[in-house]
Amino acid sequence: MANILITGATSGIGRQTALELAALGHHIGVHGRSADKAKAVAGEIEQAGGQATVFLADLMSLEQVSALAADVVERWSRLDVLLNNAGLIQTETVLTEDGHESTWGVNHLAHFLLTQLLLPRLTESGGRVVCVASDAHYGASVPFSDLDGEGSYAGWKRYQQSKLMNVLFAAEFARRHPEVEVVSLHPGFVASNFGMNTGWMSWIMRLTRLVQLSVDDGAKTSVFCATTPTVRSGAYYAKSCEKTPSKQARSEHDAKRLWELSQASVAAWLP
Ligand SMILES: NC(=O)c1ccc[n+]([C@@H]2O[C@H](COP(=O)([O-])OP(=O)(O)OC[C@H]3O[C@@H](n4cnc5c(N)ncnc54)[C@H](OP(=O)(O)O)[C@@H]3O)[C@@H](O)[C@H]2O)c1
């Protein structure tokens, strides 16, 4: 049995991944920003005979991310897998508590900090980090000169860039920390709650429901990457197979630059 922490386990792909990994006998850390939603998922797991622990934090706040990591370290003496799943898309500039544009702030920066803070626990167990990215990263490049989106705002473009950051982060983390395994993945186009809070995106999601995967199928690659004994650290997966990410996602130069800028942005919360 492994201890597996899943961010954004209260909805969609994260919730389904939590239920499936729990059914395989793993102890699930159900992370959410809403206590009611997180307790409901933990309750479902326990009713089915599984084991769950609720962890709360709004990833719009690096202080809460830091407190989340401290809570995990205090309550779990072992962490085998960190599944960085939570994600969002915005239609307009929304800033995090720390003043960062929230698409990269939540999708990348919060998980960058969480992973670093949990690295000692993951190292002790020879653990694994799984980052839920997206094929949406193809065609994107990192906006190094405007990470906080102060220029004109395009929600989909910001989302694509944040998912590219997930792939770059996994690859760079793997290079810097061979003591743990790190992969990123595309879950497929999935009928979750993703984008349902955003006007235009919610219409696209509603109009394309028929071609979307069920959340059961959407969770498959996450479950595969969390549990399969052999993954290639630093690689990108889709449909439970390794896939070549975009040229930009394979740039070691960009990965290093993003790492350094991210490190500077979270420096106040690092030991
Ligand atoms: N759906 C797709 O087609 C698709 C395709 C490629 C990649 N992905 C990726 O898959 C991942 C999961 O998305 P999904 O499709 O399952 O969407 P979803 O149903 O909207 O679930 C997103 C999860 O992230 C959580 N979350 C969002 N903002 C948060 C914050 N500030 N603090 C804490 N938690 C927060 C949500 O919490 P609440 O329940 O409180 O809202 C929810 O648990 C995302 O990283 C997304 O980019 C999705």
Image: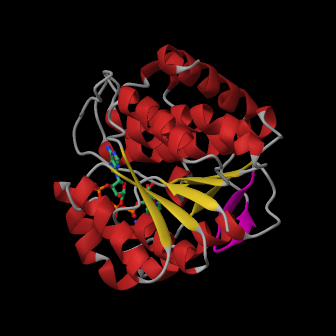
Q: Is residue 173 left or right of residue 110?
A: right
Taking 82 as reference, is 243 above or below it? Answer: below
192 w.r.t. 151: above or below: below
Residue 109 higher or lower than 99, as above or below: below
Q: Main secondary structure of the magenta part?
A: strand
Check the image and tell me how it is coloured.
Answer: secondary structure
For image coordinates 82% across by 41% down, the residue present is: 179
Of the pair 139 and 238, the residue shown nearer to us: 238
**Residue span colored magenta:** 235-243
What is the x, y in percent for residue 204? 26, 67
In this view of the protein, which residue sits in the foreground, 138 or 234? 234
Quarter placement of the N terminus: bottom right
The answer to which of 254 and 123 lies nearer the viewer is 123
* Quadrant of the snapshot with the C terminus: top right
Residue found at x 66% / y 71% = 224
Residue under the image location 35 percent in, 48 percent down: 156
For this view, does 233 lie left or right of residue 55?
A: right
